[in-house]
């Protein structure tokens, strides 16, 4: 029994929409991670290092080889911000 040609148009449309949404999701994840693959299975240590990298470089995925932290590193932690009077 042949497939009616009318069913191919919606099938193609649905397939194309899954492809478009998958591609856009991948693009957003890649953009969010500075062009790198997303991280999975993060431990507390990984999260702490990501927070430190964010404070040092301004990006969760950025890393620096500078052995001396910039001066603003001492004052941009969440603990220090919560202790500041408002």
Image: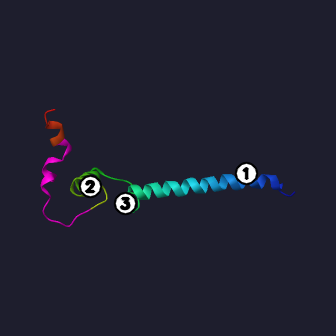
Specify whether residue 39 is in view: no
The dot on residue 10 is 1
Name the residue tied to disc 3. 34
Q: Magenta span covers which residues?
A: 63-79
Specify whether residue 82 is in view: yes
Disc 1 packing (10 Å; few <14; some 14–19; many ≥20): few
Question: Quick one: SS at disc 3?
Answer: loop
Q: Position of residue 74 (x, y in %)?
A: 13, 50
Answer left or right for 79 relative to 10: left
Q: Where is residue 61 in the image (x, y as percent from the top left)?
A: 31, 59
Relative to 5, is 79 above or below? Answer: above
Which of the marked residues, 2 or 1, is nearer the chain's N terminus?
1
Question: Quick one: SS at disc 2?
Answer: loop
Answer left or right for 3 relative to 83: right
Disc 3 packing (10 Å; few <14; some 14–19; many ≥20): few
Quarter where residue 70 is shown? bottom left
The dot on residue 58 is 2
């Amino acid at each position: 029994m042949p497939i009616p040609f009318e069913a191919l148009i919606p099938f193609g449309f649905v397939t194309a929409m899954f492809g478009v949404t998958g591609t856009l999701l991948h693009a957003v994840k890649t953009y969010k991670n500075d062009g790198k693959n997303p991280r999975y299975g993060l431990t507390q240590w990984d999260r702490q290092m990501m927070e430190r990298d964010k404070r040092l470089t301004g990006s969760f995925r950025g890393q620096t080889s500078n052995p001396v932290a910039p001066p603003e590193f001492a004052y941009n932690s969440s603990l220090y911000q919560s202790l500041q009077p408002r």
